[in-house]
Amino acid sequence: MKICYSCSERFNHATWICPACGYQPKKINCHWAFAPEIAQIGNNYEISFFPELFKLEEKNFWFRSRNRLIIWALKKFFPQSRKILEIGCGTGFVLAGLEQALPHVSLAGSELYVEGLNFAARRLSRTELFQMDACKIPFEAEFDVIGAFDVLEHIETDIKVLAEMYRSVSVGGGIVLTVPQHPWLWSYADDYAHHIRRYRANELKIKVERVGFKVVKMTSFVSLLLPLMLASRLQQQQPMTNYDPTSELRINGLLNKVLENLLSVEHWLIRSGISFPAGGSLLLVAIKV
């Protein structure tokens, strides 16, 4: 069900014209824009990073491995899903993976910044894209699953976003989240990405449960690489002004393959039922009961 941004009327029309007040959202670059006033203001993300990210993420071990984990979680915990929304979809890399892995699922992606949507549109063939502020999702009980993959750490009012997600999914559906983990792993990468926090596992669980969800799976991931991550943080000596945000993405091809293989082993262990207590990132799956 859709929610009018102007008068909060609920309706099930094919169009976005509100039957109660006649309001219709604007369009930017052919995408519905629900928060156009902030569509190009990069307060929560470095918009200039989108072009480089678009070029690098397709071959980078971290993005590829995370995609496999997300797809596994969706298939395992929500096998009957027919409609999925990703909020903060960026350049569309996750959605591109979902288009291939879930051919019979209706997909939608939202992004605060139009620049990201422009890149996502180049990658995607059947996903509906729109510009949206995750703090005000214009849907109610509309989706079987909503995903937010490394998004919540950018948002001050993360619990507000979780509450919006709760309203927007149907009963029996749920959410899949990934977030950066452990405050003690904070680095220049977090500063550059405008992260507000790296989560503690229990912190995220409490917030998710507070809005009404039931957590059914939590595990750290990028756990086998945790010693390498910690070592890189300890060696980070150069001033922030000299920091290259793409340095961790542009790595040697052989090393990239080795790291991806290590994370494939980790993925196998997670699929086998192991939940890692520590790791660079955290996966959480929860249902609306």
Image (tube, rainbow, N blue to C red):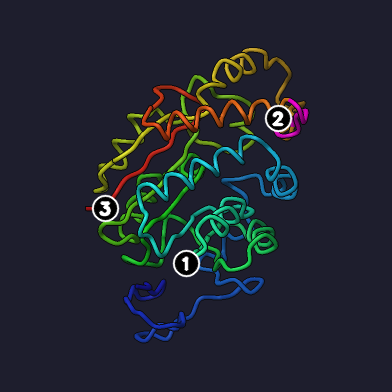
Disc nearer the start of the sequence (1/2)? 1
183 lies above or below 46: above
Contact (Cβ within 8 Å) of mark 2 with mark 3: no
Q: Identify residue for label 2.
A: 256
Q: Does dot 2 land on a helix, a strand or a loop?
A: helix
Q: Mark 3: which amino acid?
A: Lys
Q: Quadrant of residue 171?
A: bottom left
1 or 106, nearer to the observer:
106
Q: Quadrant of residue 172?
A: bottom left
Q: Residue at x 60, y 45 (%)?
A: 45
* Disc 2 residue crowd, few under 14, some 14–19, many 20+, Cα 10 Å: some
Q: Residue at x 63, y 63 (%)?
A: 124
Q: Does dot 3 land on a helix, a strand or a loop?
A: strand
The N terminus sits in image quarter: bottom left
Q: Mark 2: which amino acid?
A: Asn
* Disc 1 residue crowd, few under 14, some 14–19, many 20+, Cα 10 Å: some
148 lies above or below 226: below
Q: Mark 1: which amino acid?
A: Ser
Expressed as whole percent of the image width and height from the top left, the position of residue 162 reads 36, 49
Q: Which mark is residue 200?
A: none
Label 1 vs label 3: CA separation? Answer: 20 Å
Q: Identify residue for label 3.
A: 288
